[in-house]
Image (spheres, helix red, strand yellow):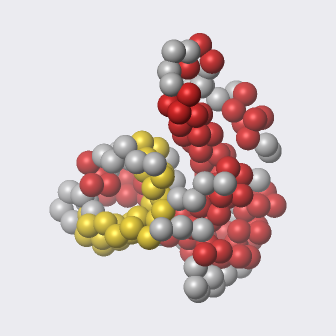
Amino acid sequence: MKLLDLMVNSPGVNPPSLIGRSRVRVKEKIMHKSIEVLVKHFRDIVEKIPRSEFRGHSSLSAADFPDGCCDDSSHLLAEYLFEELGVIVDLIHGSNGGEKNEILSHDWLYYDSIIIDITSDQFNWKGYKNPAIYFGKEDEFHSSFTQTRRQDARWSSLDDQGGLGFAYSIVKKNL
C-alpha cells in the first residue's frame, strides 16, 4: 500500500491547519505525519504475521510480538522508513529503565526529536499503560532508561545482519 493511500484516511494532516505556517514547519509536519502513518501500518502488518513465517530468523519467530521484539522490529522498521521516505532514523538502546529500573533493556527509534516505539506496550503486564505505538517527544517512561544512541538503525547498515534480511522479506511481502 502506498503512503498516499494510507494518508487519505488518516486524521491529523489537513491543509487548512497548515495555512500560515512557515514552509519548513509545514514540511516537517507532513514528514512527521507520513512517518506516523507508515509506523502504524508497519505495526499492524507485523502483528498479523504468524511467528512461524519467520522460521527462526529473528526475535519475531521466538516471541509473541511485541514481547522481546523491540530490537529486531526497530531495525526492520528503520529499513522500511528509509525505503518509503528516504529518512534515516537512529536506534536508541535503553538500559535499566522503568519506575524501579526493573526493565533491563528496551530499544526504540529516534528521528528529529521524536521517539518511535512500536513495542512500548510489551511492558504493560508490569503495570505500565504504554500505547501499542508511542510516537512523540521523550516521555517519563523512555527518559527512565540510560540511553545509548546508534546512528542509522537500518538492518542493512549492521555489520552482523543475521536473519534480519529474511525477516524483512517476510514483512515486505505482507505490506
In the image, farthest residue toward the left: 100
Residue 71 visible in the picture: yes
Towards the viewer: 79 or 44 = 79
- Vertical relation: 105 (above or below) 14: below
- Vertical relation: 175 (above or below) 97: above
At a point 42% along the width and 42% down the height, the residue shown is 136
- Vertical relation: 36 (above or below) 71: above
Q: Quadrant of residue 36?
A: top right
- How many labels were placed on the picture? 0
Q: Position of residue 134 (x, y in %)?
A: 45, 46
Q: Where is residue 14 in the image (x, y as percent from the top left)?
A: 62, 20
Is 100 on the left-hand or right-hand side of 57?
left
Q: In which quarter of the image is residue 88?
A: bottom right
Q: Where is residue 21 in the image (x, y as percent from the top left)?
A: 50, 21
Is 153 on the left-hand or right-hand side of 99?
right
Q: Where is residue 52 in the image (x, y as percent from the top left)?
A: 71, 72
Towards the viewer: 44 or 151 = 151
Q: Quadrant of residue 99?
A: bottom left
At a point 26% along the width and 67% down the height, the residue shown is 146
- Vertical relation: 38 (above or below) 81: above
Residue 62 visible in the picture: no
Q: In which quarter of the image is the N terminus?
A: top right
